[in-house]
Amino acid sequence: MNLTQYFLAFMAYGFIGWVYESILYTIQERRLILSGFLYGPCCPIYGGGAVIMVFFFYGRTDNPWLMFFGGMALATVVEYFTAVIMENVFHKKWWDYSKIKYNFQGRICLLGAVCFGTLCLMLCEFVHPVFEKKLAILSEDMQFYIAVVLAVLFLIDYIATVVNLKIKKKNALENDEVYENKLPQLDIGLIYESVGLKKRIDPIKEKLIKKFGR
């Protein structure tokens, strides 16, 4: 893959990540919520994480365990440092895992790492091969032109988002208010409850606790 194709993969997987999180937020809150740091339909952390996984694992190994644990490690590192950078730049938390077991500083958690490892395996084994085949339909010139258009839109979106955040932060400080993240915190329990799984899982969980203890 060349640089243009990596950028197109970044945008494609950023869009998929945006759809994925928007669905989770909508299920949890039972109302339409669009996810993402940017205004547009793209979550850069998903796009960047996916591209890193593709670069390190796709076509380089057939070992599923290496993909799984390698994906866990890489994605967790990316998530942690992304959280640190964004918190220091914007002085606010964009996600918080402090209520989930086995978390570190609320920025990363074991459950998230396992999910990332699974997603890495699925990405390299099933999703990215399909993406490459679809991309091959387009000529290299067409790929380049699409990448340029998307890059311009992405840059405009990023600048607009940052400027607006700084304005909101300034207004909040002038009014002695705290500018909070517009998105609620994802809660696995609430998601299960919204789709009716909690009623099925709780009895099983209670039986396991009685049998094996906490």
Image (spheres, helix red, strand yellow):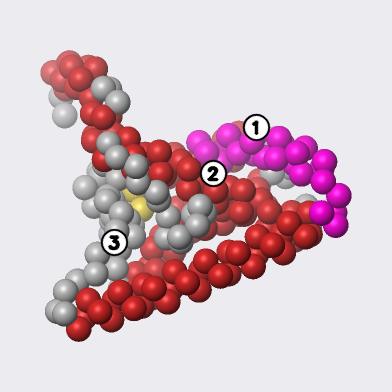
- Occupied quadrant, residue 30: top left
Residue plotted at (44% across, 69% down): 161
- Residue 88 visible somewhere in the drawing: no
- Residue highlighted by disc 2: 16
Which one is earlier in the sequence, the residue at label 2 or at label 3? Answer: 2
- Residue 101 visible somewhere in the drawing: yes
User: Where residue 185 sits in the image (x, y, percent)?
Assistant: 27, 50
Q: Mark 3: few, some, or many residues within 10 Å (few <14, many ≥20)?
A: few
How would you classify the magenta stretch by its main secondary structure? helix
Which one is earlier in the sequence, the residue at label 2 or at label 1? Answer: 2
Please state if 132 lies on the left or on the right of 210 as rendered.
right
Residue plotted at (40% across, 38% down): 23
Which amino acid does the dot numbered 1 rest on?
Phe
Magenta residue check for 22: no
- Residue highlighted by disc 1: 126
Q: Which residues are magenta?
A: 118-142
Instruction: Tell me the element at label 3.
Output: loop
Q: Mark 1: few, some, or many residues within 10 Å (few <14, many ≥20)?
A: few
Say which of marks 2 and 1 sits in front. Answer: 2
Say which quadrant the C terminus sits in.
top left
How many numbered marks are there? 3
User: Where residue 104 sits in the image (x, y, percent)?
Assistant: 30, 55
User: Where residue 91 sits in the image (x, y, percent)?
Assistant: 30, 73
Could you tell me how far apart the alpha carbons at marks 2 and 3 are, in whole angstroms? 22 Å
Instruction: Tell me the element at label 2.
Output: helix
Which amino acid does the dot numbered 3 rest on?
Asn
Residue plotted at (69% across, 44% down): 58
- Residue highlighted by disc 3: 181
